[in-house]
Image (cartoon, helix red, strand yellow):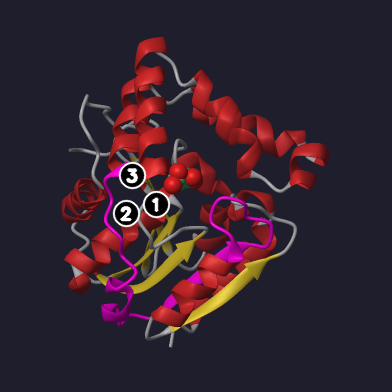
Amino acid sequence: MLLAYNDEGTGPVVVLLHGFPLSRAMWAEQVRALSPSFRAITPDLRGHGESPAPDAVYTMDQMAEDVVEMLDGLGVTEPVAMGGLSMGGYVALALVLKHPERVRALILADTRAAADTLDAARLREESARGVLQAGHPGAIVEAMLPRLFAESTIRDRPALVSPIRAMMEATSASGVAGALRGMAARPDRREDLRTITVPTLVVVGEKDAISPPDEARAIVEALPDARLAEIPEAGHLSPVENPEAFNAAILDFLRNPT
Ligand code: MLT
């Protein structure tokens, strides 16, 4: 599948994969910070933003193959720094496990290595059906939005929240359902973490309620070569809520990955 993407800056390639149900627009502050020294490539994953949204189950492996196809299309054959937030992190994990030769460093932000519980997978299927029936993602937007941010962000910084709401509302019902079903089907990657030898930065918002700091610490412990950055004043969307701290952490890592 041909993905929509942004490609800005020159230098070593950094690919950033957005969360669900967002788009590449969530990385605006990171692209601004990276592009003076790096080539920042930010795709819209299938079903999101300006990429096609077929009626299908979007497995994390399939989304990873889309990203590899995009890199091939751009002639980027050297190993890249691959980053992903939440669902983007599931995709980044699928990609590094299937194509380790394409990745030289990994950034896992506000994400998990475990699979869904049976209950969580069942709830995702219910949400997918509801959204398809309604023909719009309204129910999932209302359910997710308050959990994406730290309480203080919701209370004090509406200007950060409203563009994220708009991004979510712009996602098609088929895109939302495809991603929900793909995330529900994703495998448990916790044992696989031990086989990932590239340097990895694990980033987590201190107040992340969806993939909490304890989960990030467990990922760091399991990976052979990983370090942790906890982002203050931030929930699940740490790159949006505290871009200064998030960008400082990733720039430091990208300049000195080992
Ligand atoms: C995301 O932010 O991508 C989602 O919260 C991931 C998920 O629902 O597991």
Amino acid marked by disc 1: Gly
Q: Is residue 41 visible?
A: no
Q: Position of residue 110 (x, y in %)?
A: 52, 58
Q: Position of residue 243 (x, y in %)?
A: 65, 56
Are there few (<14), some (14-19), or many (20+) residues within 10 Å of tag 1?
many
Q: Which residue is mark 1?
A: 88
Pick the residue in front: 113 or 235: 113
Part of the protein shown in magenta: 184-213
Ligand 1 within 8 Å of the CB at mark 1: yes
Q: Which residue is mark 2?
A: 91
Above or below for 230 versus 27:
below
Amino acid marked by disc 3: Met
Name the residue at 75% across, 34% down.
Answer: 158
Is 111 left, or right, of 29 in this rendering? left
Are there few (<14), some (14-19), or many (20+) residues within 10 Å of tag 2?
many
Q: Quadrant of residue 180?
A: top left
Q: Which residue is mark 3?
A: 183
Quadrant of the frame with the C terminus: bottom left
Which marked residue is nearer to the observer: mark 3 or mark 1?
A: 3
Element carrying mark 2: helix
Per the rendering, the mark at residue 58 is none
Query: CB under 8 Å between callouts 1 and 2?
Result: yes
